[in-house]
Image (cartoon, rainbow, N blue to C red):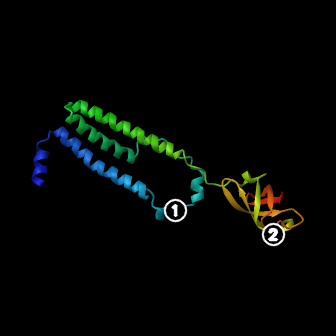
């Protein structure tokens, strides 16, 4: 078998050897890259440092990145295989290299576009508690009267949230009661009233 591969390799022209030398390793790297992407190999959670909230607040998605490691690997994989196909179709070395280059650039453009538009799908995870003003919700843990203590309410604001609440009402607001958010105290605590 090794003798057959050796005979096959020695029977090729130099241009064909170059295309094969590019396509095989970069195809393997491309496959490894795909597997790691699906199993989460792109990010090592243990090595992440810093305040996650600080990082997320400024995240506006991924910018358009035409030249990246993933795109270069895809370029060379497509370049190599396209060159091999063009040579097998009887095209000359120059034409094959041109077509292979255009195919590789098209692949880079497609991958950069996919990553760009996927990056735009991000949702800001920071809760803006001021969005709760005027909303209606339910008491989760009773809210003591006249701000004598804190209770909890469930309210629909950027998804269902359970948030701390106080009231200026003269009587406690019991669990299960319907409330309305009047204001927000220190950007952390809701001021509610019975609805």
Q: Disc 1 vs disc 2: which is toward the camera?
A: 2
Query: Tag count in the figure?
Result: 2
Q: Name the residue furthest front.
A: 176
The quadrant where residue 107 appears:
top left
Residue 127 falls left or right of residue 33: right
Between 195 and 184, the one lying in front of the other is 195
Residue 87, numbered label: none
Residue at 83% over, 68% down: 144
Residue designated by label 2: 149
* Cα distance in 3D space between marks 1 and 2: 36 Å
Residue 60 falls left or right of residue 96: right
Residue 193, position in %: x, y? Answer: 84, 59
In this orientation, does residue 106 appear? Answer: yes
Residue 25, position in %: x, y? Answer: 27, 50
Residue 63, position in %: x, y? Answer: 50, 43
Residue 37 falls left or right of residue 79: right
Label 1, secondary structure: give it: loop
In this orientation, does residue 41 appear? Answer: no
Residue designated by label 1: 49
Residue at 12% over, 54% down: 2
């Amino acid at each position: 078998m090794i003798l057959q591969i050796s005979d096959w390799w020695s029977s090729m022209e130099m241009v064909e050897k170059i295309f094969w030398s590019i396509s095989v390793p970069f195809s393997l790297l491309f496959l490894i890259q795909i597997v790691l992407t699906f199993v989460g190999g792109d990010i090592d959670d243990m090595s992440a440092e810093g305040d996650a909230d600080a990082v997320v607040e400024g995240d506006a998605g991924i910018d358009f990145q035409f030249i990246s490691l993933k795109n270069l690997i895809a370029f060379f994989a497509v370049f190599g295989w396209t060159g091999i196909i063009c040579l097998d179709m009887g095209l000359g070395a120059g034409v094959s290299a041109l077509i292979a280059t255009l195919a590789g650039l098209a692949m880079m453009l497609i991958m950069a576009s996919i990553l760009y538009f996927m990056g735009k799908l991000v949702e800001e995870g920071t809760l803006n508690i001021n969005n709760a003003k005027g909303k209606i919700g339910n008491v989760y843990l009773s809210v003591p009267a006249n701000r004598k203590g804190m209770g909890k309410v469930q309210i629909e604001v950027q998804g269902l949230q359970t948030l701390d609440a106080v009231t200026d009402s003269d009587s406690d607001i019991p669990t299960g009661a319907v409330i309305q958010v009047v204001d927000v105290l220190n950007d952390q605590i809701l001021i509610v009233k019975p609805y």
